[in-house]
Amino acid sequence: MSDPRPIGVFDSGIGGLTVVKAVRDLLPNEKIFYLGDTARVPYGGKSATTVQRYSLEMTEMLLGEDVKAIVIACNSASAVALPDLKKTLSVPVIGVILPGAKSAAAMTRNRRIGVIGTLATIKSGAYERAIHSLDSKIDIVARPCPLLVPLIEEGWLDDELTDRVIARYLGPMVREEIDTLVLGCTHYPLLADVIARFLKEKVKLVDSARNCATALQDLLDRQSFRAPAGSSGGLQVALTDAPDHFLRVAREALQLEIGEVQLREVLHPARAL
Amino acid sequence: MSDPRPIGVFDSGIGGLTVVKAVRDLLPNEKIFYLGDTARVPYGGKSATTVQRYSLEMTEMLLGEDVKAIVIACNSASAVALPDLKKTLSVPVIGVILPGAKSAAAMTRNRRIGVIGTLATIKSGAYERAIHSLDSKIDIVARPCPLLVPLIEEGWLDDELTDRVIARYLGPMVREEIDTLVLGCTHYPLLADVIARFLKEKVKLVDSARNCATALQDLLDRQSFRAPAGSSGGLQVALTDAPDHFLRVAREALQLEIGEVQLREVLHPARAL
């Protein structure tokens, strides 16, 4: 059995395209409808209540596109909104936290894992809970890194200033002897090389984008939801505000084919009636 | 004649408290109702259309508080939304751009002015237009500095990394021999000392917060809108999302007395009926 409907992917902005890239590489036959909430980006500094409300609105817009499954390609939204969405949505939904946590728990040798992300993600404790549900003896060192997203959006990917900010954030984690680091924000894979250079070979990186794509593959297989074998796949991008220069940065860094970008106004349910 | 009603002040977030501080110092008898759109902060990277829509919603919420005048304590919103709001609002409204432009045009000796701000403010060209309306022979060097707000919100105010980012942004402007620099974002006064240290005595700083307070004083005097002489004044703060740690940073840096912070949900007009 197969299902030709698209997979819905949403993020607070454009960072979730790292997940799209991983899904396109792993599941080239699938159609993807990507929705970025650029009118309200970022989610990472906002309260759980607000991020939950925004996430519900994004998933409702995706359901309007007749998607067969939803991927929350945003750590902040996965951290605080996934449990409720799992209960209420009529299609299966996965986030980026559990796939990353599983991979980290499997990779660590000394049971000391570092997690970096936005303020909202770190404050939620979602990675701690997910990792401890797999192995309660793992020590976790978590740190919010609010400057990394703006540095990435500025395009300073290979830059001495970015190296210094990374050293400031990660130095103390290395001194605490982590052997595995979870990149707990979908923007961060764009800095994976720079982070790896700082950590040398001592710490392994967990890229939540790639792990999320694998989890999606498992989900589709389990539910016989894969696209028909011969179908061509594709990517459609919609944003809630006009794209800025960061879309170009991401497109080039990820070498993603993005056609025309649609604009969608965010409406409150009562107004959308 | 006098008017005891409060002055409404809005900003995309908490940065506008620098304007509140300047107004409190200059007009201690006035009541201020401050509204920060922390649920959708920042405005600085978003499109003009979206910032206009948000600004309209913020001013409608302030009118619900029976304010006698509105201050747009946000450069991005002043840059793109002020002209329309001036036409449609039933109370006088001022922004931060024209007061800053007037001050800069009066201060420059060599007629070379630098302007820094968010992407939205710089892209709008609002400072160029305002300065050229006063003196068309002034040369303007404008540059967006998207990392400064995150650095301020991280609390790295007196920090070697912030010094380096400032040198990166301002170095080329100094080489273009500006003698005056407009701090075109209401967050930036929190970095005024660091910026002044980099510029040494060669470049004078224009702080839009202080100039905006003076413009407000003129407006109230012109319209006989000042609070009664003996009244005690005060500050009430409402935000559209729960305050994060930056409220503490700002409160301490500005030494502002902020009582209990109210939360207001942003509603679309159709839903608010």
Image (spheres, coloured by chain):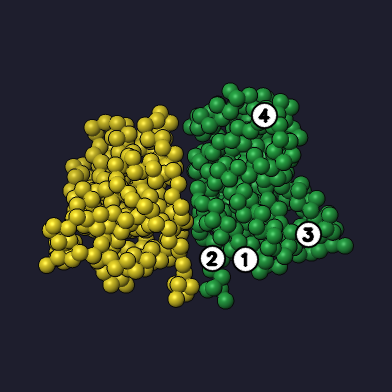
Chain colours: A green, B yellow
Residue where numbered disc 1 is placed:
A61
| Residues marked 1 and 2 touching at CB (< 8 Å) | yes
From the viewer's perspective, is residue A110 above or below residue B195?
above
Q: Amino acid at mark 4?
A: Arg
State the separation of the CA atoms marked 1 and 4. 39 Å
Q: Mark 2 falls within which chain?
A: A
| Circle nearer the N terminus (4, 3) | 4
Question: Which quadrant does the C terminus of chain B fall into?
Answer: bottom left
Q: Residue at x 37, y 31 (%)?
A: B158
| Circle nearer the N terminus (3, 1) | 1
Q: Are marks 2 and 3 on the same chain?
A: yes
Examine the rendering and report whether any part of residue A269 can be seen.
yes
Residue where numbered disc 2 is placed:
A266
Tell me the mark number nearer the camera, choosing from 1 and 4. 4
| Circle nearer the N terminus (2, 4) | 4
Question: Which quadrant does the N terminus of chain B fall into?
Answer: bottom left
Q: Are marks 4 and 3 on the same chain?
A: yes
Residue where numbered disc 4 is placed:
A112
Q: Mark 1 falls within which chain?
A: A
List x then y, in percent, for residue B97.
29, 55
| Circle nearer the N terminus (2, 3) | 3
Q: Are marks 3 and 1 on the same chain?
A: yes
User: Crowdedness of circle 4 by 10 Å Cα count: few (<14), some, many (20+)?
Assistant: many
User: Crowdedness of circle 1 by 10 Å Cα count: few (<14), some, many (20+)?
Assistant: some
User: Crowdedness of circle 3 by 10 Å Cα count: few (<14), some, many (20+)?
Assistant: few
State the separation of the CA atoms marked 4 and 3. 42 Å
Q: Are marks 2 and 4 on the same chain?
A: yes
Report the side of B30 relative to A147 (left or right).
left
Q: What element does badge 2 sit on?
A: loop
Q: Tell me, for residue A232, which label it has, or none.
A: 3
